[in-house]
Image (spheres, rainbow, N blue to C red):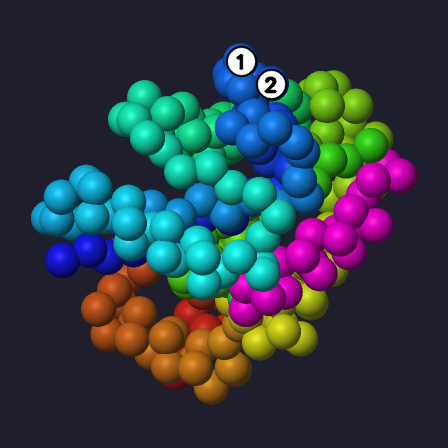
Amino acid sequence: MTTLSAVEFMDWESAKIAMDHNGLENPLDSEYKYYILIEMSGNQEEELMQEQMLELLEKLEDHYEDGVMCDSETQKEQIWQIREGISMAASSTGLTFKFDISLDSQLFEDVILKTQEKVNHLGGIVVGHGHIADGNLHLNTVMKGFNDLESAQKIRAALQPWVFDYVQEAGGSISAEHGIGILKTDYLGHSKSKEMIKYMGKMKQVFDPKGILNPYKVLPEYALTLE
């Protein structure tokens, strides 16, 4: 049996920053705005899985401009190094403003382009990559260097709460993988109704009446003071 084990999305800026940082080559002959990485896995013969991948690519041929199919583990590892190296490359390049959002994957391009409009003139580089299947987009903005605090403040002000407002209007989630923590508590209402947050607060009181588990995280203050 063969299944899709990964369908990953990268924009050009994501791929470029990872390739530059890690000394990797572009697996395709040209530069494209967006890349999709598809991986199949299963217990069938390698040759049969390659045939199934070719069939999939034929069905999708009207939706992409170019492609490459890995013919060795080495080539596969090199391509995965690009995808998996994005986050570290961004953090090493400069101060990075990270948003881990969830929304319809058809909106990935729209939110990336609109974010670029918000920050490009401030020196911010938008890096968008994520997981197609669950609509998870890592929408990050990289500012080259770490010492320009004035630019950093302007970029942050341009991004927040604008990104959360966009997600709310799109019916998505402000946090897809990495949790609410402390920084997103005030924006939890962008993804959850007030009634739902109140129920979350009541559950917190039942299981953690002294507030010692993950204190100050996830829930806004009003949800923690319910009678």
Q: Nearer the viewer, residue 15 or 119?
A: 15
Measure how far apart labels 2 and 1 are at the Cα level. 5 Å
Vertically, is 65 above or below 15?
below
Q: Which region is colored magenta?
A: 104-122
Q: Secondary structure at mark 1?
A: loop
For the point 83% across and 40% down, the residue is 120
Main secondary structure along the magenta-highlighted residues: helix
Disc ID at residue 20:
2
**Residue 80 x, y percent position in the rendering:** 39, 32
For the point 37% across and 50% down, the residue is 54
Q: Secondary structure at mark 2?
A: helix
Q: Which residue is identified by label 1? A: 23
What is the quadrant of residue 75 in the picture? top left
State the quadrant of the C terminus: bottom left
In the drawing, does residue 58 fall left or right of residue 34?
Answer: left
For the point 73% across and 23% down, the residue is 144
Task: Name the residue type under label 2.
Answer: Asp
Vertically, is 101 above or below 225?
above
Seen from this angle, which residue lies furthest right?
Answer: 121
C-beta proximity under 8 Å, tags 2 and 1? yes
**Residue 167 x, y percent position in the rendering:** 62, 67
**Mark 1: few, some, or many residues within 10 Å (few <14, many ≥20)?**
few
Seen from this angle, which residue lies furthest top?
Answer: 23
Task: Name the residue type under label 1.
Answer: Gly
**Residue 114 x, y percent position in the rendering:** 77, 56
